[in-house]
Image (cartoon, rainbow, N blue to C red):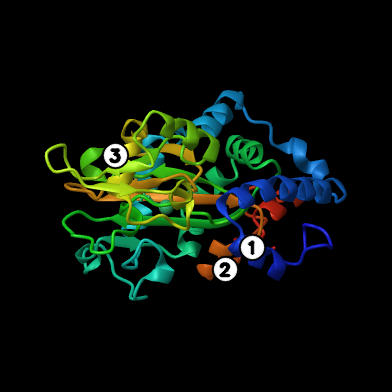
Amino acid sequence: MITGDSFNLEQLVDLQGKCSYAQKKAISHELSKRIRLYLENSNIFNDYDNFQPRRDIKKSVETLNHNGFIELGSHLNKRQILETNSYFSQLPCYNAHLVSKSDLVPRKLDAGATNFPFGSFRMNDVIDAPYILELANAPEMLALASEYLGCLPTLYSLNAWWSFPGHEVEEKMTQGFHRDEDDFKNCVLFLYLTDTDEGSGAHEYIRGTHSQDLTRELLKGTSFPLINIGTDESPQWVKVEFEDLFEGACYGGDRIYERIFGEQISQINGKAGDAFISDPSGLHRAKPPKEFSRLIVWIRYGYYENKAYQADGIIPVDFDWSSGRIPDSNLHRYINRLVLRV
Ligand SMILES: O=C(O)CCC(=O)C(=O)O
Ligand SMILES: [Fe+2]
C-alpha cells in the first residue's frame, strides 16, 4: 500500500467512510505527506521534474483554493473538438450520467439514447477517445492537481456523458446541488465538448463552500441559522445547523443554498473545448439543458482507490504504453495506475 505500513487499503476506505468533512480534510494533509515520502523513497520521485507546466499555475491554485473552482479556458481547437465529438457521436451511450448507474443497455444517438436525460460512455471508450487521456496527463493539469492535493495525484476516474434536453428529471442527482467527497480530498478537471450556457446545461458552483472556514465567513452576513425558504409575504423559516451543510452529499437543499449563498453561485459558461477544475466537495450542480444537448468530460484526481472508485466499480483498462500518447515513465505509470493497466 502506497501510504506506508500503518494503513492498508481496507482500513483507509473504512476511515474515509467514518470521517466527518473536517476530519477528511485534516487527514488529507497527513496522507499527502506520506505519499510524498513514499514517492521520494521510490524511483518515481526522480521523474517528477518531467512535468514543468508551461505557464505559471500559482494564481490558478490560489483561485482554486479560494473559490473552489478555476476556469482554464480553451484546451482543444476547432478541429480537435470536431474529431472528439464525431468519435462520441458514433458510439453507444448508457442512460445515466455514469454507466454503472444505467440499465446497461447501449443506445446510439439516433436509436433511443435521447429518450433519457443522460447518456454516458464506458471508461475504456473515454480513454480511447482522442485528446482526453492526453489532457488528463498534461503537465499543467498534473501540476495544478499536485499543488491542490499536496502530492502527485492519482487519476481514479474518467467519464464523458450527454445531458439531453426535454426531460423532467425526477430524482435530480447531478442537477441538484450536492457535494462529492470521493476521497479525503479530490479535484475534477471538466472539459466541455459542446458550447454550454444557461440553456444548455451550464455547471454551477457555490464559491467558498469547499471550505468550512470560508463558509463560516459567508454565513456571517445572513440570517443563518434561521433561513426563510418561503417569500417575504408568506415566509417559511427553517433552522439549519452548520454541520447540516456538510453532512453527506447534501442533496435536497437547493432552496436553502440559494437563499443563503445566492450571491456566491457562479454559473460556468463555456465554449466547446473549454476546461475548468473544481473541488467537488463544494456545492455544485448542472442546470438541466433546455434547448441543446450538452457533452462533458470529467477527469478525477485523488490519492488512492477511494470510496468513489470502489463504488463505481472502476477497473484499469488495457493500454499500450508504447503508443506514445502519454510518456511511458514511472511517474505516469504511477499517476494512471488505477485507470490504465500497468
Ligand atoms: O453535470 C454537471 O455539470 C455536474 C456533474 C457533477 O455533479 C459531477 O460531475 O460531480
Ligand atoms: Fe457532482
Q: Quadrant of residue 194?
A: top left
Q: Is residue 54 above or below residue 293?
A: above
Question: What is the quadrant of residue 320 in the picture?
Answer: bottom right
Name the spot of residue 13 as percent of width and height, x first. Answer: 64, 65
| Mark 2 residue type | Gln
- For label 2, the SS is helix
In x, y percent, where is residue 203? 34, 43
Asked if the residues shown at circle 1 and circle 2 are in contact, with their CB atoms under 8 angstroms apart, the answer is: yes
- Residue 319 seen by the camera: no
Residue position for label 2: 310
Instruction: Assign the C terminus to one quadrant of the image.
Output: bottom right
Q: Residue at label 3?
A: 259
Which of pointers 1 and 3 indicates the residue nearer the eye?
3
How far apart are labels 1 and 2 at the CA level?
A: 7 Å
- Of the pair 79 and 318, the residue shown nearer to us: 318
The mark that comes first in sequence, 1 or 3, is 3
Question: Which one is earlier in the sequence, the residue at label 2 or at label 3?
Answer: 3
Q: Residue at x 70, y 44 (%)?
A: 29
Q: Residue 305 got which mark?
A: 1
Query: Real-space Cα distance between discs 1 and 3?
Result: 36 Å
